[in-house]
Amino acid sequence: MRAGSQVDGGQARIDGLGPLRRTLYAEWPIRQREKFPLYRVRNAPKLHCVPDNKNHHYVPRFYLRYFTSQEKCIDLFNVRTKKLIKKAPIKGQCCRDYFYGKNIENEKSLSAVEGQIANTFRAIFERRRLPSSFTAGHLLLCFHIVTQAYRTQYAADTLDELTDGMWKEILKHDPKVPKENLKDVQIKYEDPALVALGHAMRAFPLLMDLEMGVLLAPRGSEFITSDNPIVMSNKFMNWRRLGSNTGIASKGLQILFPICPILTLVMYDKDVYHFGRSKSSAIEVASAQDVHELNVLQMVSASKNVYLFSPAANVFKVAEHAMRFRRTKKGLVQVVAQTEDEKGKSELIQTSHEDIRTDARLDFLRIHSQAKRWLGAFRSEKYQKAVVLRNDHYWERFQAHENAIGAGDAKFEDMVSAIYGKAVQDGTF
């Protein structure tokens, strides 16, 4: 599926599945077809609003319910113990007390957005469409992708790790700080999830230039999800080891998000990748190997648990493959340059999150020949950019508008038009 593709009266949609896809869909178990209808709606999961309490969920419960046939329980696989736990209470998953601080308005605001995105997901299931480019629905989907990526326990732990590492690198040169005591303290934010979320929310419009597609799991396979469900990867630039290649504006970015056991949303850099086997197809039937590789990515991404709809997920096989790719560190703090003169010593400290690196081929995303030529030329350069962006002009406009907001001369609401030169249209499809 390509957001903004000119089909069905200019609307981006999931095309009719066709004979092969209808056959695959017809053979799905009844409980899966009824919960995730591709032709008509039956028993669409309903949003359960979060009451005013201290228990803050960083992966919404309405989303987790897509991955279970039960109302209050879900099957999970614990990554550390490698044990499958049946019928774990959904209420206790992906949550912490006062995770977004003790101001209940923070949690209320997130819950309000969850209500809107739940309706968008239901519309995708019912109408067989993704939001058209630069509509309110497209904006909301991009907002949800970014906020979900940066509101989790994993994101909070990553920020804590980076903050601690950076400040200890600075303080170890301060004669007033006993160096032997540094190892006994941790330097971190009081509410790291709020800080991480705040930084990400301002930059989410930079995702709107990515194309979108949907993968359908074949019969006998299912997608799993996790407590850190937004996977950002980059097989185009994964060979680089200095810093991260999966920033919101990075060239070659891929975002992989299972929205139910049979559908995964794919967002990708259209100047690098081609999605699927057909230029006009809006939905791609994944191979069993595709599903396995995406499930491995989910398990590598997870903080503690992955969640599955049924044994068809083959979670123990996934775990056997995934464990060697699990990250030992969440963030990287590196001193990349040092200078010293009569005034003293200075360092350039680089911080970045640790990217997911696996042996996944992801054959549904093929690299364009033009992108391959660009990559060959780039790799031959003696001096390479530390950060490679998808579009330098978009980034420059984003920074200029950020500066104008800081000076009181612009509003965040105008960020999309400032970057792309077009306004967001009402509606979704």
Image: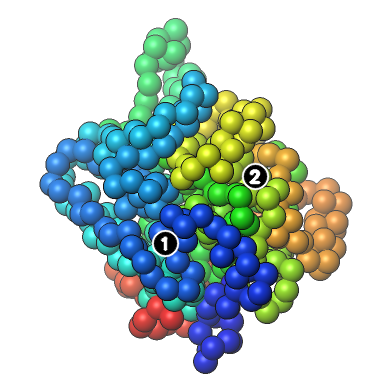
> Which residue is nearer to you in this view: 118 or 197?
118
Q: Residues within 10 Å of mark 1 (few under 14, many from 20)?
A: some
Q: Secondary structure at mark 1?
A: helix
Picture coordinates of residue 372 (x, y %)? Answer: 82, 61
Colour scheme in use = rainbow
Nearer the observer, disc 2 or disc 1? Answer: 1
Q: Does dot 2 land on a helix, a strand or a loop?
A: helix
Q: Neighbour class for label 2 at 10 Å: few (<14), some, many (≥20)?
A: many
At x 48%, y 24%, the residue is: 83
Q: Quadrant location of residue 300?
A: top right
Side of 107 where 21 appears, left or right: right
Q: Please identify the quarter of the rendering in which residue 325 is found.
A: top right
Residue 94 seen in render? no
Residue 76: which disc? Answer: none
Q: Which residue is mark 2?
A: 292
Q: Is residue 372 above or below residue 55?
A: below
Q: Which residue is outermost to the bottom?
A: 9
Task: Find disc 1 in the rendering and name its residue.
Answer: 34
Which residue is located at x 70 percent, y 60 percent?
A: 365
Count of picture labels: 2
Q: Give the mark nearer the N terminus: 2 vs 1.
A: 1
Q: Residue at x 68, y 39 (%)?
A: 358
At label 2, the amino acid type is His
